Image (cartoon, rainbow, N blue to C red):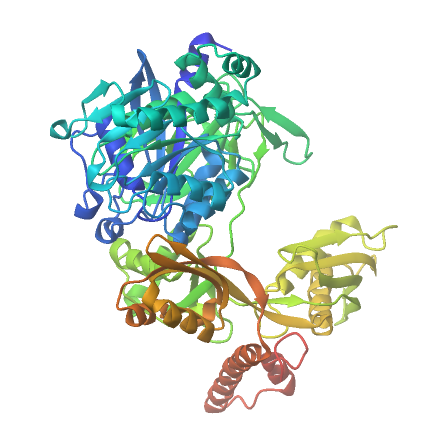
Amino acid sequence: MNTLKDSKLRRMRNIGIMAHIDAGKTTTTERILFYTGRLHRMGEVHEGGATMDWMEQEKERGITITSAATTCFWKKANTEYRINIIDTPGHVDFTVEVERSLRVLDGAVALFCAVGGVEPQSETVWRQANKYRVPRIAFVNKMDRTGADFITALNSMKDRLKANPVPVQIPIGAGAMFAGVIDLIMNKAIIWHDKTQGSTWDLIDIPKDLVKEARHWRILLLESVAEHNDNLLMKYLEGEEITAEEIRATVRSATLNLDITPVFCGSAFKNKGIQRLLDGVVDYLPSPSDVQSVVGTVPGSGKEVVRAPQADAPFSAIAFKIATDPYVGKLTFFRVYSGALDKGTQVYNSTTGRKERIGRLLFMHAKDREDVTRVEAGDIAAAVGLKNIKTGDTLSDPNHPVILEQMDFPDPVIRIAIEPKTKADSDKLSAGLQKLAEEDPTFKVSIDPETGQTLIAGMGELYLEIIVDRLRREFKVEANVGKPQVAYREAFRTSVLERYTHKKQTGGRGQFAVVEMEIGPNESGVGFEFINEVVGGAIPKEFIPSVHKGLKNAVSHGPLAGYPVEGVRVRLFDGKHHDVDSDQNAFEIAGQMAFRSAARRANPVLMEPLMKVEVITPEEYMGDVIGDLNGRRGRIMSMDQRQDARVVKALVPLSEMFGYSTDMRSLTQGRAIYTMQFESYEPAPKSVAEKVILSSYGNRLAKLTNQLLVRQFNGKGSISAHEAACECGNDRSRGPW
């Protein structure tokens, strides 16, 4: 590899800032941009002036909704490092933004509130980082707040995250008395100057009253890092002096191996601790050259290939975000894993099999853009000109195609009906929904086959509220919105055998297909699993994908209430074909009808989404909160003490949680707070299932009645018995009659 380019890679950091909502992520990012010279004035979230929160909704609500990307430079020991930062949302409704960011990042800074410690979304993003094996450093923020407790925050990391936090700093004071930090590696105290907004500081000897405590924590640090370096362990056991460089090198190695999480502390709002956190980013988080080469497969053959993070390797990248820009149109954010890409060249979308030309290449700074002519391995950039692309697609060299590991996204759990207020809004609504669906893979748009209504589905009420607001602001669409609806699922409890014959003869060439299969639940309880065990050419190979396609279509409408069937396993083991009358269409229909025929015999059950709810309430309202959760069919999982408040954790059906914010404020006089996130699907109680199924049946019956009235009015007669049966489910493929 070229030494100069290798040096450039080693001086690059691709990091994300992740945490629970209100832990101070955006404020911390604003301070980083200020101290690195990227900003000349600090933006404040509470004033709506944060650079990284550039959407109108972000400014108004004081929360991060989309992942904003930026680049800054930090000099340490006469070496300048390039840091690409993605500031991610903390609200659970926007968890997909965190997921797709972590997929393309090399390291992360995990923020924790010094008062709250590890909170629900902290656990979620930590699990996401574990999934992608992302090395982390931690920053205990808000040490200036009343009730701040560094040790409690550390313990919560151990208990709730099962992490191995290793402090490299400890705070000097807490709350209003927080003054600075003690650097355990340098064995010095750092006091920031308020008059310079923390831009300058004093490096002094440790105050005498803290020497004993600092010695205790330094010993713990040395013991922790010595476990991961035999030479260091011998020097420690023999009482030899261990240099700061040796400690940093071992901390870095252990961090990259995910053995430890170095912990820093400070207050972003009070301008204390950020420069040392930046030192930690360059000291302990990986460069692109420290990360393992990505492994992909060659389209078609499935052969594994390795793409090293080198500029002279074949180009490969992953598109991790699609956004609509009012000035340049569709923006595709991507991470380059190998090779280089020049402006104006062609790229191959290995996922779709299409070639496209890059119009412009950009480095992004929140909503601002910097045009560049070339991007290389390790870069995070945006492209203009890609039309047929979606989140998770692999871009590669047309002469060396590769498909990298795709992203998995959760299905939405809540949906609402939306309709334009005027005819003029109708076309704009369709265009707006299409663009928003391109941006976010968890946002789904569908048409209710019973009512003809447009349904939008997402990860939570706030999420859908933001979508509707964006339609109004960005696409000038005024729309009426219905009440939230639960995205139920259906599942099978038993396996059944099905033989289905599709035979149609109307003169000339007919249609013929026979399929034999076993349909039932799979082990994981999620997804759709198709197994082809056909041998001897009973069904020609070219028709197997058609059977698969028919089955996938059928799975989207369950036998009880028309909801998608989850956790299905289909084993196709036999069939028949005709040399003349069999074709792809015949086998697709056979697969679809076989599933529908078998579905009711597979003991179907309605599944409802359960939410993990955490309520933090004053002691005096504990009984009311628990009683209310029980009344919502909630299962109390635990009750803990957190400083002067009580923490109640419960699993509650989503259908029972609509309007909970208002009810909880009333119960606790506005003194309690709560978080909620999707946990899993579980069988709905019989009374709930019957109500949902009857409601679905009622919608179909209303549609049938309306069709009958329209036909009679138009003099076309009545609806046939077959049509009525199909509409109301008497053909065994839909709900009960």
**Of residues 524 and 264, which is closer to you in this image?**
264
Outermost residue toward the right in this view = 536
Q: Is residue 45 above or below residue 733?
A: above
**Residue visible at 43% across and 34% down in the picture:** 334
Residue 613 seen in the current view: yes
Outermost residue toward the left in this view = 195
Horizontal side of residue 540 vs 123, given as left or right: right
Q: Please state the horizontal and vertical placement of residue 161, each as a whole percent of the image.
A: 49, 43
Q: How many marks on residues?
A: 0
**Residue visible at 41% across and 13% down in the picture:** 245
**Residue visible at 46% across and 53% down in the picture:** 442
Q: Please state the horizontal and vertical placement of residue 87, each as a whole percent of the image.
A: 34, 39
Q: Please state the horizontal and vertical placement of residue 584, each as a whole percent of the image.
A: 71, 56
Horizontal side of residue 234 vs 169, given as left or right: right
Q: Please state the horizontal and vertical placement of residue 434, each as a whole percent of the image.
A: 40, 54
Determine which quarter of the picture holds residue 455. bottom left
Residue 330 seen in the current view: no
Q: Is residue 436 above or below residue 375?
A: below
Horizontal side of residue 171 vs 167, given as left or right: left
Q: Is residue 265 above or below residue 206?
A: below
